[in-house]
Structures are given as structure tokens and as C-alpha cells.
Image: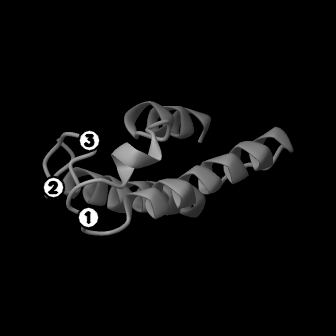
């Protein structure tokens, strides 16, 4: 889980200024998605620090949320990649 969190923090533009996140075409609110995903990551970091062990369902949920968020960020032009795949 910690590796997944690290990879997400490196791959997604959490530190981007709001003006960059909220400019241009918007097909889903990038800022809201990034805020939601950031809170999910912070929650899991806290839970891991307290000794909680995530299950497969927890990992799958976080992966699913991040994939959906990534697709929106690609559509909105905030990150590069294909919309249909993971490339």
C-alpha cells in the first residue's frame, strides 16, 4: 500500500497550483478529484502508521479510484497519457 501511495503521489499533480488545475476544458472537476484522492491517501497513510493492514479489497478500491481520476486528468490535459489505456 505504501508503494502504491508513493507511486500515485509521484504520478499525479497534487502540488499543481489551482489556476493550472482549473483552467481550460473541464470534463469532470480535476481539483475535486485531486482533493478527494489526496484525502484517501492521507487517510491510508494515517491508518498504516497506526498498524492497520490493508486487504486486497482496500488496494483494489484505491487503484480503481486512482485509475478513474487519472482518466479525467488526462482528458482535462493535466497529465499525459492515453484516455482509454494506462499508457
Name the element at disc 3. loop
* Residue 3 picture location, percent across and down: 54, 33
* Quadrant of the rendered image containing residue 20: top left
Real-space Cα distance between discs 3 and 1? Answer: 13 Å
Marks 3 and 1: which is nearer the front? 1
Quarter of the figure that contains the N terminus = top right
Residues 69 and 64: in front is 69
Q: Is residue 60 left or right of residue 51?
A: left
The reply to whether dot 1 and dot 2 touch (C-beta < 8 Å) is no
Name the element at disc 2. loop
* Residue 65 picture location, percent across and down: 44, 61
Q: Which mark is residue 83?
A: 2
Which residue extends farthest bottom? 28
- Name the residue: 59% across, 60% down: 58
Q: Is residue 45 left or right of residue 58?
A: right
Q: Which residue is mark 1?
A: 26
Amino acid at each position: 500500500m505504501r508503494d502504491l501511495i508513493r507511486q500515485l503521489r509521484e504520478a499525479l499533480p497534487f502540488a499543481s497550483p489551482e489556476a493550472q488545475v482549473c483552467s481550460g476544458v473541464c470534463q469532470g472537476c480535476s481539483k475535486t478529484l485531486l482533493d478527494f484522492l489526496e484525502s484517501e491517501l492521507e487517510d491510508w497513510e494515517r491508518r498504516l502508521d497506526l498498524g492497520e493492514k490493508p486487504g486486497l479489497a482496500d488496494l483494489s478500491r484505491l487503484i480503481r479510484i486512482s485509475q478513474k481520476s487519472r482518466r479525467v486528468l488526462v482528458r482535462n490535459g493535466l497529465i499525459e497519457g492515453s484516455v482509454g489505456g494506462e499508457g
